[in-house]
Amino acid sequence: MTINDIKTPSYVIDEDKLIKNLEILQYVQEQSKAKILLAQKAFSAYSMYPLMSKYLAGTSASGLFEAKLGYEEMPNKEVHVFSPAYGEEEIRELVTFCDHIVFNSPAQWNRFKDVVKASGRDIKCGIRINPEYSEIETDIYNPCIVGSRLGTVKSIIDEADIEGISGLHFHTLCEQGADVLARTLDVVEEKFADYLDKLEWINLGGGHHITREDYDVELLISRIKRLKERFNVDVYLEPGEAVALNAGYLVSEVRELMENGMNIAILDTSAACHMPDVIEMPYRPNIIDAGMPKEKAFTYRFGGPTCLAGDIIGDYSFDKPLKVGDRLVFLDMAIYSMVKNNTFNGMPLPSIAVKRGEDVTVIKEFSYEDFKCRL
Ligand SMILES: *Cc1c(COP(=O)(O)O)cnc(C)c1O
């Protein structure tokens, strides 16, 4: 099969593009001696984990289920987990298989350190710091905003008992370059120097857009090397986006055309259900052969087949008028898509396929049961 004859809607993971990204990450690891983990939050299509495990040091997770998925599907690789607040049952299970557990505060660490010790396993425990420095401009993605619950500020760590902690973690970037990381490290290295002098590792979180064309990979490598030399620490990065950036599509079909002051196309895919970040972030995903509104002769507003008025993907223009049955290929749909989709309105979930060369293989299909079983 090719992308032109698979059933729609389908997410299609582009294995060749994924490998290109993984090769860049491997280069960073080789040059800098940092370890890179897959942040599963962005991309958890575990059929690709055997491939990814050839390049990456392991997985990072936002809680028990993701951690378990990484442990099961990327065997013999490191399992790291962070949660803003662990539950008692959750931590009891996590200590049976995790390698690194990052706590959001000294209070969480002190609540659960006995559970960690009782496990008898050599688990590296860390504290997530809030360096109070972030260049993220969108508030919902800014973990350093006033009143943020993510991470602990230095003044509180200074007062706390963190005996038994071996590392620090921060995550304050979002789709950003190595220049932003460099400025963030300037702050972190200065503020937390006394801690880093004594600790064994630091995790620089995610949000590093390492595989984007204009990313300054050499600056990243030099800053990691400097960090390792200055403090003699192991360095971890846990990008999500960068691993599968531009490595997937969502293939959809035009289901109906109509007019209401403008041309409207109703697709068989929904922004609300299949690409929720389009509404949440919000952003306008790119489509192959489509231009900005009015850029080409025929402009359409694309919406999904749900009853939500705001289930709108965006406005796009084309050289030729669209017809019912035309295929549309949305770009960069591997990340934050499959992991976030839902069956609101009883919407069927898109299939998942993998593209190798021109050949496309469907690896997962969903049915009515996937809607019913959750209710
Ligand atoms: C979201 C997240 C990541 C991954 O972020 P990307 O922007 O996808 O690279 C890594 N670590 C933590 C703690 C996160 O919350």
Image (cartoon, rainbow, N blue to C red):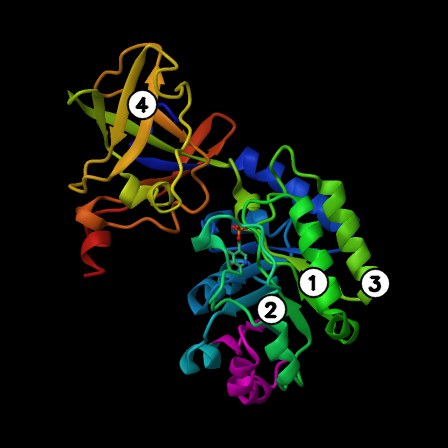
At label 3, the amino acid type is Arg
Distance between mark 4 and mark 2 Cα atoms: 46 Å
Distance between mark 2 and mark 1 Cα atoms: 9 Å
SS class of the residue under badge 4? strand
Q: Nearer the viewer, residue 130 or 316?
A: 130
Q: Is 103 covered by the magenta stretch?
A: yes
At label 2, the amino acid type is Ile
Residue 280 in the image: above or below residue 97: above
Q: Which mark is residue 327?
A: 4
Image location (x, y in percent) of residue 162? 64, 83
Q: Are marks 3 and 4 in contact (CB under 8 Å)?
A: no
Q: Residue at x 36, y 40 (%)?
A: 278
**Which image quadrant is residue 38 in?**
bottom right
Distance between mark 1 and mark 3 Cα atoms: 13 Å
Q: Is residue 99 visible?
A: no
Q: Which residue is mark 1?
A: 188
Which of pointers 2 and 1 lies earlier in the amino acid sequence?
A: 2
| Circle 3 or circle 4, nearest the eye | 3
SS class of the residue under badge 3? helix
Image location (x, y in percent) of residue 243? 56, 45
Q: Which mark is residue 359?
A: none
SS class of the residue under badge 1? helix
Q: Are marks 1 and 3 in contact (CB under 8 Å)?
A: no
Q: Which residue is mark 3?
A: 230
Q: Are marks 2 and 1 in contact (CB under 8 Å)?
A: yes
